[in-house]
Image (cartoon, rainbow, N blue to C red):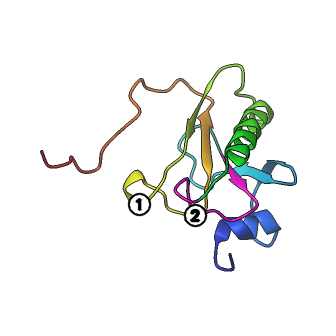
Amino acid sequence: MEDCVFCGIAAGTMPARIVWEDEDFVAFDDIHPQAPVHALVIPRRHYRSLADDVSESLLGRMCLAVTKTAEVKGVAGSGYRVIVNTGRDAGQSVDHLHVHILGGARMSHGMVNLVEKPEE
């Protein structure tokens, strides 16, 4: 996709600190890290989110890319959190499927902090 920053990173036309890559995926450090280790894994092919028609094969290979990235970043042994935001309410800020890998420090037990509480 022409105006997608992550497509630009995958194509090598946008700058990023590449951590790991293969023919299908690129992993790079997040520019606004939320943990000592914060990397993103993206498919080279553009998918908006998990809501797109994403194959099981792609998702399985993406999970393998996540584990390889965690190894390269040095958090595979100590543990890491994997997050996929889908849509605006979930906090997806770039419309290109991506997985966050966060680690390098002990994380809190809770996983969700709501900006707004839903009406009951």
Q: Quick one: which residue is furthest to the left in this view?
A: 120
Task: Report whether 95 appears left or right of 120.
Answer: right
| 99 relative to 75, above or below | below
Q: Which residues are magenta?
A: 40-52
Task: Quickly name the residue at label 2.
Answer: 48
Question: Which image quadrant: the N terminus?
Answer: bottom right
Query: For the residue labelled by badge 1, is the local secondary structure a helix, a strand or a loop?
Result: helix
- Residue at 24% from the left image edge and 51% from the top image edge: 116
Task: Quickly name the residue at label 1.
Answer: 88
Q: Position of residue 49 (x, y in %)?
A: 56, 58
Amino acid on which disc 2 is placed:
Arg
Q: Position of residue 82 (x, y in %)?
A: 58, 36
- Residue at 38% from the left image edge and 28% from the top image edge: 110
- Residue at 81% from the left image edge and 68% from the top image edge: 11
Locate residue 38: give its quadrant: top right
Amino acid on which disc 1 is placed:
Arg
- Residue at 48% from the left image edge and 53% from the top image edge: 86
Q: Position of residue 32 (x, y in %)?
A: 56, 53
Query: For the residue labelled by badge 2, is the local secondary structure a helix, a strand or a loop?
Result: loop
